[in-house]
Amino acid sequence: MTDVPDIATPMRTQAIMNSFGINTKKSLGQNFLTDINILKNIVAAGNVQPTDNVIEIGPGIGALTEQLARAAKQVVAFEIDDRLIPVLEHTMAPYDNVTVVNQDILTVDLEQAIKEHFTDPEAPLKLVANLPYYITTPILMQVLQSDVKFANIVVMMQKEVASRLSAEVGTKDYGALTLAVQYRMNATLAFTVSRTAFVPNPNVDSAIISLTPREPLKVLPHNEKQLFNLFKIGFTMRRKTLWNNLITAFGKDDAMKAKLTAALADIDLDPRIRAEKLSLEKFIDLHNALVKTGVYSK
Ligand code: SAM
């Protein structure tokens, strides 16, 4: 397939958009990559192999999809914008291993979609995408809270969000997103990308983050959904104490306060502490203590 010209040049991107009468929509985070070297480096960071299934979120006009199609077994790409579906039918015509699904990724049941769209749903699965930046956090939370096991995840996002993914405990970037990532994956910054690599140029600089499955945790939570909810509760008001955020979420009545006090005492936690000082392990202990004292049901 090397005789098919790359989509990702500024000239070809413009020509494709002109021939379909497409203008990019800022509201959908449409900044298309036009630098072939960056696309190749993204695929390399994902170590995409001919045996791999790949999910892509937001294929746009297909610049990254095409590189993934050349490297992977099959690519399933979710695109919300109806206007781009005929464009993708045209640009992906040379590739018989690409399935485009016209759906908002935030409404996709990933487990179901994998069974439905991949011809071999058991093949190793990777997620590789240049994400729509306006929903980076919800997408990551959705992916991390699902039971889908990704061999790795390589995603481009705005640099500020990338710093939150790999933040150390106690720093200003540390928060619910950091904890959700750490719970399942190890995050490393693969490389940064200048805003000039896109059409149109975004207002922010970008970074590629690589996530790989983490080593097993020593202590597991009773309930993962509740744990993720506790991450959010802890950081509802960043500057407030953990205690304040807990009583706001669970209730201020005496019976609830007694249960919360017992849970904190059980794991030697000072109620005046702020959530940003709590490691992932401590959050899991807190969740399990809240189950023990009946704040959460099992
Ligand atoms: N992959 C292309 C590239 O690298 O040139 C385009 C990336 S662009 C940053 C983000 C893409 O995500 C756009 O095509 C946009 O229409 C799409 N998108 C935005 N919101 C979406 C959603 N909720 N679900 C699926 N795709 C979405």
Image: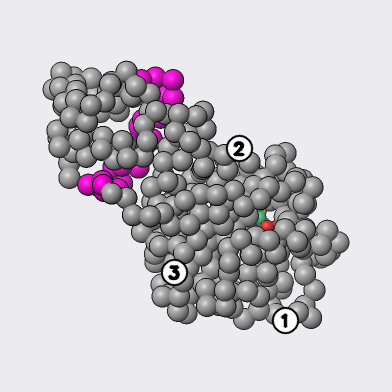
Residue drawn at 63 percent across, 41 percent down: 159
* Residue behind mark 2: 160
Q: Amino acid at mark 2?
A: Glu
Q: Amino acid at mark 3?
A: Ile
Does the magenta run of residues contain 234? yes
Residue 214 percent location from the top left of the image = 41, 54
Total marks placed: 3
Q: Nearer the viewer, residue 42 or 134?
A: 42
Does the magenta run of residues contain 142? no
Q: Residues within 10 Å of mark 2 (few under 14, many from 20)?
A: few
Q: Earlier in the sequence, mark 1 or mark 3?
A: 1
* Residue behind mark 1: 1
Q: Nearer the viewer, mark 1 or mark 3?
A: 1
Relative to 290, does residue 298 appear above or below in the rendering?
below
Residue drawn at 22 percent across, 31 percent down: 267
Q: Which residues are magenta?
A: 219-241
